[in-house]
Image (tube, rainbow, N blue to C red):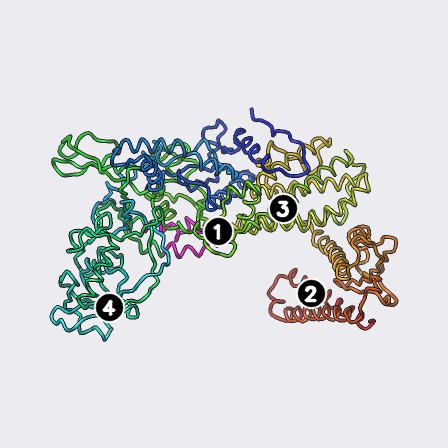
Amino acid sequence: MEESMPKVELPKTYDFAATEQRLYAWWEKSGFFKPANDPSAPDFDPTKKPYVLTIPPPNVTGELHLGHAMFVSMEDLMIRYQRMKGVPTLWVPGSDHAGIATQLQVEKALAKEGLSREEIGREAFVERTWAWKELYGGKITKQIRRLGASCDWDRERFTLDDGLSKAVREAFVRLYEKGLIYRGPRLINWSPGLRTAVSDLEVEYSQEPGTLYFFKYVLADNPEEFIPVATTRPETILGDTAVAVHPEDERYQKFVGRKVVVPILKREVPVIADEYVTREFGTGALKITPAHDPNDYQIGQKFGLPVISMMDKAARVNENGGPYQGMDRFECRKKIWEDMRAQGLVIKEEPYMLNVPRSQRGGEIVEPMVSTQWFVKIESLAEKALAAVRGGEIRIVPERFTKVYYNWLENIEDWCISRQLWWGHRIPVWYCADCGKETVAREDPTNCAHCGSAKIEQDPDVLDTWFSSGLWPFSTLGWPNATADLQYYYPTTMMETGYDILFFWVARMIMFGIEFTGKPPFEVVYLHGLIRDEHGQKMSKTKGNVIDPLIVMDELGTDALRFTLLVGSTPGNDMNLSTKKVEANRNFANKLWNAGRFVVGALENAPATPQNHPQWTLADSWIWARLQALEAEVDRLFQTFQYGEAGRQIYEFFWSEYADWYLEIAKLQMNEGGDRAYYTAETLVRVFDAVLRMLHPFTPFVTEELWGHLKRAVHAHGPSLPEVTDWPEALMLASWPIARPAEGWEAQTIADFELVMDVIRAIRNLRAEKKVTPGKRIPATICAGERLAALEAQRGSIAYLAYLDAEHLTLTDSLAEAPQGQAALVVSGVEIYLPLAELVNVEEERARLSKELEEAQSQVARLEQLLGSPFAQKAPAAVVEKEREKLAVFKETADKLKEQLQNL
């Protein structure tokens, strides 16, 4: 039996530290995160379409950072919204084995013991790594729970668990059997420190000061002639196999087809012409080293050039380096330049900013290097992935990233999937010592599939982590087995992640999803931006500008952090974050709490039942009408993925309309007692309940806690209040507010109350400007014309909120003559006079009124131009009429301002 929410008295202040863990434990224990329509349940309905998310799996070694906080908050927002909409929801959690990162951690631990992985051997090392994973692997998932993630933790997966390992092997074997996987030498990124190939994603580029080295490439047939060449890496001269120039570069046309001599090594290489060469860079002549530069590699393939590798796996010069063999790459750079200078081949050196590729994990400079690796032929997979987006089966949000996606897949290279690590999915290929052939199998073989020999040995490499995570949306649901989960929950609905891994992960999931299931893995790709510091700088430990989400949650609460991340976000755009913003949203949570205390108190002080049918005040009707408009707009924004704007509008409604205006008027209305108090309390509850529901996906903890108190207060009040009957066990299970159809009265109600607010604001502003003692009640005369009835009905509210003397507040439709010596205001055609004679400076008043007249006349001119344009014929009649009404009000305001200026 599910537990009810633990009863906690409503304290004066919100204690997030005492609330968050208690609520999360209750949610999880009660099974609220599990799908409402599960294939294993007896009442399962396969016709109901579910909403499914799979979490981008964080590294099992990971510590929570802002990137995690962003995607967890966003995905929890999405799943909570859909759950409240009544859609069956599933959010699958899990973590990635993170081959390089995890292996590094274990190797560091071994080093402290004076050991290396080679010394203890592969089997012992893998055992140690599993032990390390068991000890530390749950840390990141606990931290994700702190963010309020409502995942189905019973379905948590790990990329090296048995099921996913089976999926990885099945995928490899299928691709191999189709001829899409091969082994061979190609240019890859090589990490000398890690001694493994690394993916593009694991390489980070940084701008660093370096040197551009200019030297002579002497012609083989005439040592007196030379081609000037510039390079940033002189050591790679040892691997040069050509010099390239632009075919239209008149300086070098005479050299094309001849040969030049590689410095020091005296090897002759050809001069070739290719349009790839940039004439403006360096000297306009380019040394070509196919084994150590991706662009040179392409030129080498085009011209059939030899590929000479001059480095070994430790980035030391190999046997192709002549006298430099055995030297470190940077030691070689200095020595070869000295030797070239001694031979008269050096021209000059210039400072140059380099784009240096560094290993994301080790920080060392990565080397482009030719290496024998396993590759996936990617072209046919890419074509299907392109077709899925072009055909509308997958939508990318924001849409501008679609072009980026197309460009990458249209120019994609074969994918290097092997890594020289011990932690990961070992490549399921066995080599035969007798026949030399390879066996690829779903189950570990004992004999060669070709000759039957028992002398077989498995490939030592493991698969790229992105290979297993490319299967994530369907391997987590049981693929390759036809599980009930896979049949119902796949394809998933949404893939939410950062735009920086659109290529490396998202595109691969799409390719693999279509290849192995015949269906795209998700319907929508939602890309969030990166989080930067308050000045827009990338966060880094070296800059000291990193914000730790765990510290922020400890100090300011999870809701404040989530709300800041979510409301500050727009699809695909980076956002700047500061703790000041989080502090402001901590204040928002406190404001919400204080409002909740007032609403619960009002309900406790209201009669149990009304005596008469409802008679709503203008304020009651206004806040209800505004709520309906908000509900409709927020739902539209959610449907169009504008989550940040939806949150901002809920925030503005609660703070600027409900709290600042309706709650203040409600205090006055509650004092009347009787039916007025009952219906005011009902309105307070109905609107606050809706606000809590809409805010819940953004700020789950404070809203759940407040809603629980509100629910208990409603039930303790007696008969359930009208309109407030949906009180499930938890707010996260409550229904999402749906706007009622408009009934026709809303527009006038909103206009009338906005007039009241404008009048009150104008009086408050003038009081502040004239430095009238706060709280001091003063007389006033308000000439309202045809708006008299609307303002007369709100006499009490105007006097109360504008600090006017109610007994000396005159409301009239016209004045025989304007009061003399008083401060005058005109608001939407309504004249206001305040007896502030001793505070009025005639010249200042004239300047103020003149400025207001200028603004009114500007609006009149703008609207007259608008209504005299094609807009009046093309726009809907209701829109045009609204603009005409605005024009009439501004004209009336301008006339009255002119009159007041004359009276001065």
Residue 386 covered by magenta stretch? yes
Q: Which residue is mark 3?
A: 587
Mark sitting on residue 159: none
**Is residue 132 found left or right of 87 in the rendered image?**
left
Residue 591 covered by magenta stretch? no
Place of residue 602 in the rendered image (x, y in percent of width and height, measured from the top left): 74, 39
Whole-angstrom CA distance, mark 3 to mark 4, is 62 Å
Quarter of the C terminus within the rendering: bottom right
Q: Which residue is mark 1?
A: 545
Whole-angstrom CA distance, mark 2 to mark 3, is 41 Å
The residue that appears at 81% across and 38% down in the rendered structure is 674
Q: Which residue is mark 4?
A: 285
Q: Foreground mark, 1 or 4?
A: 1
Q: Which residue is mark 2?
A: 884
Image vertical order of residue 842 relative to residue 429, above or below: below
Callout 1: SS: loop
Whole-angstrom CA distance, mark 3 to mark 1, is 23 Å
Place of residue 14 in the rendered image (x, y in percent of width and height, measured from the top left): 64, 39
> Where are the magenta residues, as a range?
382-406
Whole-angstrom CA distance, mark 2 to mark 1, is 53 Å
Callout 3: SS: helix
Sequence-wise, which precedes: disc 3 or disc 1?
A: 1
Place of residue 357 in the rendered image (x, y in percent of width and height, measured from the top left): 33, 54
Sequence-wise, which precedes: disc 3 or disc 4?
A: 4
The residue that appears at 45% across and 55% down in the rendered structure is 399
From this viewpoint, which residue is outermost toward the top?
A: 1
